[in-house]
Amino acid sequence: MDDRQYFQSIFDIVRAIPPGRVMSYGQVGAEIGVSARTVGWAMANALEGDVPWQRVVGADGYLRIGRRSAQLMDVQRRLLEREGVAFLGNGCVDMACHQVGVPDTPKVIGLAFE
């Protein structure tokens, strides 16, 4: 599979994340067998388009895009807050409440969530 195919598969998974929910880079990567770093690279290329890139965060809820740009981190946080995502005092997403695949949240089933 070449990069475009990986990216398309990653984008398909991210498009299926429901509003108000997040997945970690590693979770997305595990769905198709690529590294979290590959998912990060794909998300960096998805900032303009129909992929809800803001729904992919670090496993600890940290908005990793902040390493690239403080402005993009602010944009990501605002987009997530508009979807109802709560943040902890340390600025990280409350993963216990919003992460796909933890108890009482949707689980990935193919490209759908149940």
Image (cartoon, helix red, strand yellow):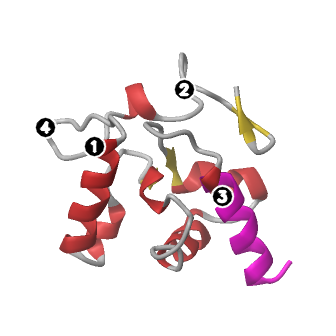
User: Which one is earlier in the sequence, the residue at label 1 or at label 2?
Assistant: 1
> Does the magenta-highlighted stretch encompass residue 107?
no
| Lower position in the chain sequence, tag 2 or tag 4 | 4
In space, the residues marked 1 and 3 are separated at their CA atoms by: 24 Å
Residue 60 percent coordinates (x, y): 37, 45
Q: Mark 1 near mark 2, Cβ–Cβ under 8 Å?
A: no
Q: Residue furthest right?
A: 1
What is the distance, in whole Å, between disc 1 and disc 2 at their CAs?
A: 20 Å
> Which residue is at a point 56% across and 63% down the rendered structure image?
51
Identify the element where label 2 is drawn.
Answer: loop
Look at the image and give the residue range highlighted in magenta. Answer: 1-14
- Name which residue type carries label 2: Val
Residue indicated by mark 3? 29
Residue 37 quadrant: bottom right
Real-space CA distance between mark 4 and mark 3, rounded to the nearest whole angstrom: 28 Å
Where does label 2 land, which residue? 102
Is 85 situated left or right of 9 in this image? left
Numbered label attached to residue 81: 1
Residue 65 versus residue 19 in the image, above or below: below
Q: Quadrant of residue 72?
A: bottom left
Quarter holding the N terminus is bottom right
- In the rendered image, which residue does mark 4 sit on? 89
* Secondary element at image label 4: loop
Q: Work out which quarter of the rendered image holds the C terminus and state it.
A: top right
Image quarter of residue 63 = bottom left
User: Quick check: marks 2 and 3 in contact, CB under 8 Å?
Assistant: no
Q: Which residue lies furthest to the top in this view?
A: 104
Residue located at (50% from left, 58% from top): 52
